[in-house]
Amino acid sequence: MRTRAIAACFLTIAAVAVAAQPATRANAALAPPTVNLALTGTATAATAAAGHAAAAAIDGDAATTWCPTSAVGTLTVDLGRQRRLDGFGLTLLGAAPATATVEAAALPGRFRVVRPAVAVVPGSPALFPAAGAARWVRLSMRGDGPPCVGEFRALGAAAASVIVGHDLSFAVQERAAGAVYTDNGRVALPERILAAHGAGYVRLRLWVNPPAGYSDLRSVLTMARRAKAAGLRLLLDPHYSDFWADPQKQPVPAAWAGQDLPTLARTVRAYTRDVLDALAAQGTPVDMLQLGNEIRNGMLWPVGQLDWTAGTGWDALGTLLRSAAAGARDARGATPKLMVHFDQGGDNAFSRVFYDHVVAQRVPFDVIGLSYYPFWHGTLSQLRANAGDLATRYDKDVAIVETQYGWTMDNGDQLGNFLWQKSQLVPGYPATPQGQLGFLSDLLSIVAAIPGGHGAGVFYWQPEWIPGVGWAPGEGTPNDNLTLFDFTGRALPSIAFTHPLPGPR
């Protein structure tokens, strides 16, 4: 049925003239993102303390450490084949600074110094450019005591295509509220700034009948036009609810209340078709579609709710997911890629059980979408293990479809934040612009290294949600210290996490 609504760089940012760019130039030919190529290599060390093996230095998680047994240590990484490198990164953990020297070799044993001894301050990522080709890289450390390395990065272009996207669902409201975004002093729309720094997608949330001004179809149509004008593709995230839907709540829209499963399935199918048709009709077709939002406990409660204790609800959820997929097939034009979204990105056992059931229900989908917030969903090592296992187990692409990390512990408005105490931070990634940049670069590297080329990409959640627009009418935002813009709309260094090495301004 057709509803009334439907019918109606690590340390610097490269200077870009975003406002002056043609609409499609920012995204016409995206350069492969810069990632840590050491993740697919092997590491050996002259010495390693118990519990601090060499492999921990190249596992993508700066909270794990390789520690030599003395004040001097040497780590060698075999990249597996010769690779073009653009620079290196290092996170040192502990209390004392140390000096680091980096060497590289294209032939066995033929090392040359590419970075002479440089002082490294512990606790935050340090990065430096050093172009050249190498198969082996060697890190030599010297400190007052054993210098523990959280992560050693050999940075170069990703071998496979990796999506970088951003959920900009509040951007229309932010503009109406008068928010202004700048990049190196130049004013531009946030999607233009993000596209200029390597983004290829925008993700947009859709509610059926939300409070005035929030993410209804009209807002999505408006933002889709802006996104496509900036050269960005579109991931649509229908919540199939009137307002927020997540693992704690999946309320059926008021207009759909009281429908039994067969009727609700028909409604979901028609609604999905009509929404996609509306977007295609204005020249902004959907490229990827989520079949619900964070549906760990089902969707469209109570009809599609899961009971994990009793093991019930899967048939109803499967029916609703298949109906949403059928609606996508019914829509005009090419069927978008379909994603099933699970929120526990660091929990492999839970993820397996969920996706085993989804597959058993014969739900057609192309992409596994995971939420990963490190203050809720485990370590980066756990996320990496889970993503790799899911990609192999189901032969599916995996995307981190929601993630955030803090750039400050300060609060930009009157509402308390989700990240508010230091105990929530991950060692090696302080709540600073550089710490946020390091986290995102490492996360992107983990996704790029998923086996079989199954790393679909990373979507940052609400990078533009600065103070001024509340999560609900009359409220503030609990996310204003997790954005990629500061409280006044100025782009942070993390805006450039696709190409994080320092460069000229």
Image (cartoon, rainbow, N blue to C red):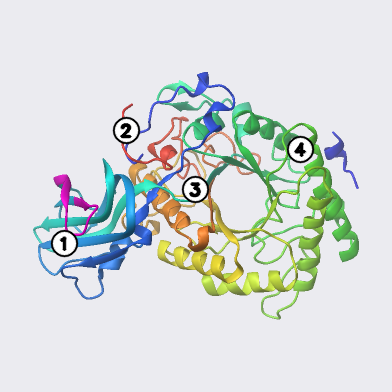
Q: Check whether the beta carbons of the residues at disc 2 and disc 3 lie within 8 A of each other.
A: no
**342 left or right of 29 in image:** right
Residue in view at x 62 percent, y 75 percent: 353
Residue holding disc 1: 74
Q: Residue 226 is drawn in which quadrant?
A: top right
Q: Which residues are magenta?
A: 103-117
| Of pointers 3 and 4, the one earlier in the residue sequence | 4
Residue 70 at x, y percent in the picture: 10, 67
**363 left or right of 41 in image:** right
Q: Check whether the beta carbons of the residues at disc 3 and disc 1 lie within 8 A of each other.
A: no
Residue 50 at x, y percent in the picture: 22, 76
Q: CA distance from mark 3 to mark 4?
A: 36 Å
Q: Amino acid under label 4?
A: Leu
- The disc at residue 271 is none
Q: Amino acid under label 1?
A: Thr
Residue holding disc 4: 279
Residue in view at x 49 percent, y 31 percent: 196
Residue holding disc 2: 503
Q: Number of labelled discs?
A: 4
Q: Amino acid under label 3?
A: Gly
Residue in view at x 38 percent, y 37 percent: 493
Residue holding disc 3: 416
User: For the residue labelled by badge 2, is the local secondary structure a helix, a strand or a loop?
Assistant: loop
